[in-house]
Image: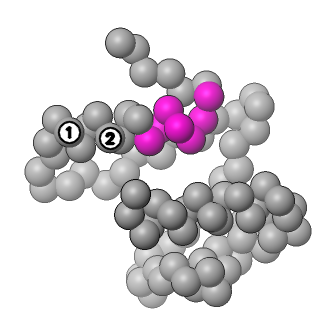
Amino acid sequence: MNETSVKYKELVHKCWADPEFADHLMNNPKEILRQEGIEIAGNISVAVIQNTETHFTLVIPAKPNKVSQKDLENLVQHANDLHPHFQALP
C-alpha cells in the first residue's frame, strides 16, 4: 500500500470517528487536507462528498496516458473496498 492510500484510509477513519472533523473537511477541504499532510496544488479544486446507506458517488478519475490491465484490476478492487454497493461482475 502506498503512502497516499495510507493517508486516505487514515482520513476516512478520522471522519468516521469524528463527525465534527468530517464537517470541517467538507467545508474547507484543501485546508484540512493540508493540515493532514496532503498537499493539493493551488489550481485544483476539491469537493468532498460523503456516501450514505442510500447514496453512492462514483468518481471517474482523470484518464491517464496509459492504462494497463493490472491498473484496471486495481481500480476495481479499490472501488469494491470503498463501498459495499459497488460490486464488480465476475
Q: Is residue 12 above or below residue 89?
A: below
Q: Dividing the picture into quarters, in which one does residue 65 lie?
A: bottom left
Residue range (magenta):
78-84
Q: Secondary structure at mark 1?
A: helix
Amino acid carrying label 2: it is Asn
Question: Looking at the image, is 49 positioned above or below residue 25?
Answer: above
* Residue carrying label 1: 70
Main SS of the magenta part reads: helix
Based on the displayed image, in which of its 4 quarters is residue 69 positioned? Answer: top left
Q: Quadrant of the C terminus?
A: top left
Q: Is residue 73 left or right of residue 29?
A: left
| Disc on res. 80 | none
Q: Residues within 10 Å of mark 2 (few under 14, many from 20)?
A: few
Q: Is residue 6 above or below residue 42?
A: above
Q: Would you identify the image quadrant in which residue 56 lies?
A: top right
Q: Nearer the viewer, residue 13 or 55?
A: 13
Q: Which mark is residue 74?
A: 2
Question: Of residues 58 and 83, which is closer to you in this image?
Answer: 83
The x, y position of residue 36, in whole percent, is 62, 81
Tag 1: amino acid:
Lys
Q: How is the image coloured?
A: one colour
Percent across and percent down for residue 51 are 69, 43
Give the mark count: 2
Callout 1–callout 2 Cβ contact below 8 Å: yes
Residue at screen point 50% across, 32% down: 80
Magenta region includes residue 57: no
Density class for disc 1 (Cα within 10 Å; few <14, some 14-19, many ≥20) is few
Residue at 20% x, 55% y is 64
| Residue 30 seen in the current view | no
Q: CA distance from mark 1 to mark 2?
A: 6 Å
Task: Please state, as top left, top right, bottom left or bottom right, where the N terminus lies in the image.
Answer: bottom left
Residue at position x 77%, y 31% in the image: 53
